[in-house]
Image: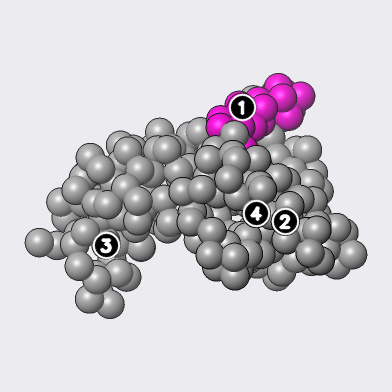
């Protein structure tokens, strides 16, 4: 234990801390998910966030020190998102055949996600800046932050809401669709990508390449539609 402590003290002074901690914790989270046989609550991302937060609090490590190394993993989010094009290309024929259903489905999902969030948060008495930060919660983080900044929301809060939305969707989308007896992997992938962007799509990709392909398509289209729709809705639903 003493050796581990000294190792931690050494890593704390270098960018290796965040990188090593993130990789090790995520690897352990994958093992937990495997032992839990893919149970929704054993989501590796959720487990990793909880463990890393507790680790930083317990050791008194500033987030800035942690992120010096974690930024390298953060940088890979872009390439990882682009890599979703691989299963999309493999399922290109299916996507073309389903095009007539895909566009209205994602349009409806984008409208409902943004409008319902804004209406519910207003009814619950949320301030205008919170409402505007919540509005783009179902799109990927860079787009959500850009939208929030454009309409007067808080980009940092928007990023947090996106993360919470993705984690929640990854836990609930699968069971909810099973209860509704939605078995078509194309529909399941579109639902995951529209409701929970990359986090929910990544979970779908673990069980079906087709679902992952349609989820990746939904992430892109939902981002474009939300960027157009949310600024229009903001003036009507966000209040003053």
* Residue visible at 27% across and 52% down in the picture: 154
Number of the front mark, 3 or 4: 4
Counting from the top left corner in percent of width and height, residue 54 is at 60, 68
Q: Which residue lies under the disc numbered 4?
A: 9
**Outermost residue, left side:** 240
Residue range (magenta): 73-93
Mark 1 or mark 3: whose residue is earlier in sequence? 1
> CB atoms at circles 4 and 2 under 8 Å apart?
yes
Q: Which residue lies under the disc numbered 3?
A: 130
Vertical placement of residue 143 versus 50, above or below: above
Mark 1 or mark 2: whose residue is earlier in sequence? 2
What distance separates the C-alpha of mark 4 from that of mark 1?
32 Å
Label 1 crowd bin: few (<14), some (14–19), many (20+), radius 10 Å? few
Label at residue 79 = 1
* Quarter occupied by residue 55: bottom right
Label 3 crowd bin: few (<14), some (14–19), many (20+), radius 10 Å? many
* Residue visible at 60% across and 41% down in the picture: 14
Counting from the top left corner in percent of width and height, residue 237 is at 20, 59
What distance separates the C-alpha of mark 1 from that of mark 2?
35 Å
Counting from the top left corner in percent of width and height, residue 122 is at 24, 70
What distance separates the C-alpha of mark 4 from that of mark 2?
5 Å
Which element carries disc 4, helix, strand or loop? Answer: helix
Nearest to the observer: residue 96 or residue 109:
109
The secondary structure that most of the magenta stretch takes on is: helix
């Amino acid at each position: 234990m003493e050796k581990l402590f000294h190792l931690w003290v050494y890593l704390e002074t270098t960018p290796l801390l965040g990188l090593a901690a993130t990789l090790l914790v995520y690897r352990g989270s994958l093992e937990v998910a495997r032992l839990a046989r893919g149970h929704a609550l054993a989501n590796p991302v959720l487990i990793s966030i909880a463990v890393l937060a507790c680790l930083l609090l317990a050791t008194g490590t500033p987030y800035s020190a942690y992120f010096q190394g974690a930024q390298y993993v953060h940088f890979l989010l872009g390439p990882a998102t682009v890599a979703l094009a691989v299963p999309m290309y493999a399922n290109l024929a299916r996507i073309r055949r389903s095009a007539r259903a895909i566009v209205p489905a994602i349009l409806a999902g984008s409208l409902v996600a943004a409008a319902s969030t804004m209406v519910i948060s207003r009814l619950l008495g949320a301030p205008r800046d919170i409402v505007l930060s919540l509005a783009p919660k179902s799109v990927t983080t860079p787009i959500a932050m850009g939208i929030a900044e454009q309409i007067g929301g808080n980009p940092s809060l928007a990023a947090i809401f996106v993360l919470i939305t993705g984690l929640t969707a990854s836990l609930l989308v699968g069971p909810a669709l099973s209860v509704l007896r939605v078995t078509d992997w194309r529909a399941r992938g579109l639902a995951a990508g529209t409701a929970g962007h990359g986090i929910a799509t990544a979970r779908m990709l673990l069980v079906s390449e087709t679902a992952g392909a349609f989820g990746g398509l939904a992430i892109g289209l939902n981002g474009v539609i939300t960027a157009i729709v949310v600024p229009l809705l903001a003036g009507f639903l966000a209040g003053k």
